[in-house]
Amino acid sequence: MVLFETRGLTKRFLGVTAVDAVDLSVEAGELVSLIGPNGSGKTTLFNCVTGYLPPDGGRVIVRGRDVTGVAAHRIARLGVGRTFQLVSVFPRLSALENLLTFLQQHQEENVLARLVRAPRVRRLEAAAVERARSLLDSVGLGARANAPAGTLSYGQRKLLAFAAALMPDPDLLLLDEPAAAVNPTMIEQMKTQIRALHRQGKTVLLVEHNMDVVMDISQRVIVLDHGQKIAEGPPEVVRRDPKVVEAYFGR
Amino acid sequence: MRAARWVLGSALLVAFPWIVAAGLPGQQRYILHVLIFTALYGALALSYDLVVGHVGSLSLAHPAFFGLGAYAAALLATEAGWPFVAALPAGVAAAAVVALAVGVPMFRLTEHSFAMGTLGFAIVTQIVATNWVDFTHGPLCVTGIPKPQVGGLRIATLPAFYWLGLATLALVALLYRGLTTFRLGRAFHAVRDNETLAAAASIDPLKYRMLAFVIGGAVAGGVGALYASYVGVLCPGELTVSLSVNLLVMIFLGGVGSLRGVVVGAAAFTALPEVLRMAPTWRMVIYGLLLLIIVIRAPDGLEGLLRRGAALGRRRPSSSGA
């Protein structure tokens, strides 16, 4: 089953075509990497897909539903989670609260029920706290649950942002450079985490510069250059593709 | 222990008119008057902090909502003879409806433009109140606003008003707490701290900003209606933009985003100018200096001082034992 696809997705900035008619399709349960030189349009594509940028052309389809131009918070509600390249947490909230913020359950509760803290809301809250604690434990942040997120190290914040994205149990997870600017131990931990997600049957689309990570964990690799898809296939095939070699190293 | 302190504190607050009557019989009217203002200012500052402190939107439209509620209730009571129990909700509703209508276009503006836009709205509201003489009586003011009557109970004495003010403050504080803690509070703070990430957490930033803005405006309207019925006269001068400045001083010097801080700030900055009347010539100079000292020495407000004090108090016994 195709969980997520783009058809002819295009985004232009002042005459520069950052994403140029990209067709992309990800099956449910796949672990796919999106790679390409700097400025090849990977993050722009992510932003178009998750509702942060309106595309100038083409379609974004999640589970057969056209979500082109839909607001970011609505796409998130469809079970699409994402992380950001520049680590993004709520610095003043504790690590635990950061995770709880990601579990809003908008559909099940109205404002009034939450204001008076109806028993149902309290039960959901208790379950949410339990889930948040186990996720924090799984990324090794259990001991820092009550620390304000702003006081965590860069790598810890990266893990926290990752755990937070998992909080609503998304079916599709878009990770923007999870291994960038973290130490080798943390990279191994990140790889383990992503593999574990894949084993649980989650669909993961990864933007990553670290080729070791990409070649090691991806089932399939898609290569962008100047906004266009230039190659696609299993990691070992893509890495030998002359077009890819040229895009990275020049002719 | 904590519950006992709460009960004692509440009992003291409720019994205050008698305590003052026994202790300072000559001053009772004046002190109660200041306390009624404190309670109303406290409720108003809390409603404003929902917008400024919790969703982080610097709205300067709050005096307009206060004025809308006050004028709606006052005019309905004097011109149409509505009883207080109907005029008060009408004031709340009027402010809420206008906040809803104004909020939708205003929140399309980014930070500074939002402040300017809401400031413009506040100024326009005051100009309308001043110049639409046929309707608002303009500078002649709305006079003879009746005292509140709830059922068979007429609230006309100072102690009765004090209790009404206290009950209002308590009610608004409960609402404030319900909104700003737990899941709603987290959604508000997410929008304030990182709007992009909030959207990734399925939080609709506009929805929560509007929620705080409309509820804050509605409460301000209710406080306005109470204020008008207490003072008995309502003039366009009550809607000045300087009310926003006063409220911002209370919130930021009290402790932005904190229930206790905002209430302490409202109490301090309503009572302080009155206490300083003892030195009439230097009053505003001393007031200004005190503000400066607090800004420099306690940038996170009185709430920050209170917390540091409490932490110090907890540390001392243990360190002496070690």
Image (cartoon, rainbow, N blue to C red):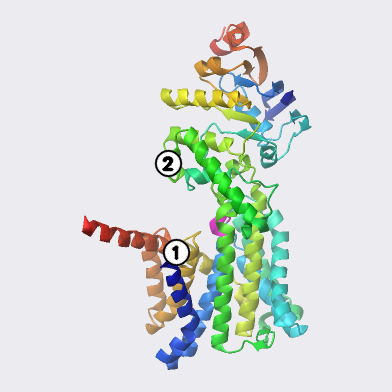
Residue B51: within the magenta?
yes
Pinpoint residue A241: horizontal percent, then vertical percent: 61, 7
Label 2 sits on what residue type?
A: Arg
Q: Which residue is mark 1?
A: B253
Examine the rendered structure and indicate whether residue A129 appears above or below residue A178.
below
For disc 2, the neighbor class at 10 Å (few under 14, some 14 to 19, many from 20) is: some
Letter of the chain that mark 2 sits on in the rendering: A
Letter of the chain that mark 1 sits on in the rendering: B
Say which of marks 1 and 2 sits in front. 2
For disc 1, the neighbor class at 10 Å (few under 14, some 14 to 19, many from 20) is: many
Q: Main secondary structure of the magenta part?
A: helix
Q: Which residues are magenta?
A: B50-57
Of the numbered discs in the image, which one, if any, rests on residue A207?
Answer: none
Q: How many marks?
A: 2
Residue B148: within the magenta?
no
Q: Which residue is mark 2?
A: A144
Pinpoint residue A128: horizontal percent, then vertical percent: 57, 45
Element marked by disc 1: helix
Label 1 sits on what residue type?
A: Leu
